Image (spheres, rainbow, N blue to C red):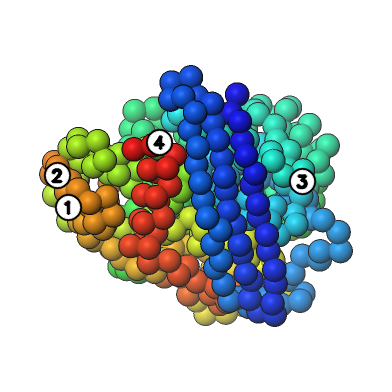
Amino acid sequence: MPDFGAYFPRTGRLTGEVFVDYGIHTRFNLPSHGRLSLGWSFARRKIRYRRAPAACRIARKSMTRVLITGTAGFIGFHLARLLLAEGFRVHGYDGMTDYYDVRLKQRRHAILLQNGNFSATEGMLEDRALFDRVADEFRPEVIIHLAAQAGVRYSLENPRAYIDANVTGTFNVMEAARRLEVRHLLMASTSSVYGANEEMPFRETDKADTQLTIYAATKKATESMGHVYAHLWNLPTTMFRFFTVYGPWGRPDMAPYKFVDAIVEGRPVDIYNHGDMYRDFTYVDDLVRGVRLLIDAVPVRPADGVVPEGDSLSPVAPWRVVNIGNSDKVRLLDFVDAIEDCIGRPAIRNYMEMQKGDVQATWADATLLQRLTGYRPQTGFRDGIAQFVGWFRDYYGK
């Protein structure tokens, strides 16, 4: 079993700002690696934000209970850690699937379990009886649904897994939210729903009907399902479209992880479309801060059906979709160059054709996020890469 040291989240608030100090010191006893010690120094970041209108804010008279699916995953782990640092009570639900190294997921959960306000259940979202029992016992006021079968390329190999997890699993989450009448249901979508759209930056109000993979199609389906439940049952629902997320504790199947791992070990790096690709790389701390602030931005059904210009709010439901991206289109080769600079070693570049289902570019317009919360992601990709490379080297001892 992992032997974890201390995990120290601390927060202090000022009007219109939040200071977050955090640090981790973790030790693992690993059969294959011996004893691995990770040291993190404390860091402080000041983030300015505007509070949501009073009518839309969730009251914090007591510790708010939040049920998060996917807390052993990359984004769910970081979000749970942030909410715990702010005094929320969090219950995680995760299937611990073997899509990638389960040990990484277990270590994330072990860190969260150091906090007495965190509890967790291992189970599949398709197991409706188990999920219902967990939700009924915890009685969440807010549900944040992040768990999904991820990965654009894997959806070409095993499309049925995406139907089961992303469609059936999401339906079970929505049913629980409806039955419990939660104050706010927030669910993750993806920038992949923009599919073949070419006009950039992508805006939430753009038409998005040309998905290119089953992964993207299932995510677009959950947006529509969420809208139906918001309309029928007056269930306040916010969908967020994530853009390429990276950072410490990241997924091994994602490009930043693959690039760093290959360059450190001197293996070739596969670069698709001969490097002529662009992504809106979003640092994970920025992304989860956006999700946290959206908890308070509860959508309200317009009484007269009139929606402000630029808002994705439905005219017939308390439903909205919001981009969470860095609003910066970064060339893939510039991203690789920055990794090389951090590691101090050139990549062995294996240029390849574009993969089936992939797109040349993604780029978010995050204006709506800023309008709703006063916040916009603010970590440049070079700073984010330095943080990720530092974590990777410490964690794997490379």
Q: Which residue is the site of mark 4?
A: 396
Name the amino acid type tagged 2.
Arg
Answer with left or right where residue 269 lies relative to residue 147: left
In the image, residue 212 sits, relative to residue 387, either above or below, namely above
Name the amino acid type tagged 4.
Tyr
Mark 4 and mark 2: Cα distance apart in space: 23 Å
Position of residue 339 measured from the top left corner of the image (x, y, whole percent): 27, 53
Quadrant housing residue 88: bottom right
- Image depth: mark 1 or mark 4 in front: 4
Answer with left or right where residue 268 lies relative to residue 339: left
Q: Which residue is the site of mark 1?
A: 275
- Image depth: mark 3 or mark 1 in front: 3
Mark 4 and mark 3: Cα distance apart in space: 29 Å
Secondary structure type for disc 3: loop
Secondary structure type for disc 2: strand
Q: Are marks 4 and 3 in contact (CB under 8 Å)?
A: no
* N-terminal label among 4 and 2: 2
- Image depth: mark 4 or mark 3 in front: 4
Q: Do the residues labelled 4 and 2 touch (CB within 8 Å)?
A: no
Q: Do the residues labelled 2 and 1 touch (CB within 8 Å)?
A: yes
Q: Which residue is the site of mark 2?
A: 349
In the image, which disc is placed on residue 117?
3
* N-terminal label among 2 and 1: 1
Mark 2 and mark 1: Cα distance apart in space: 10 Å
Report whether residue 166 is seen.
no
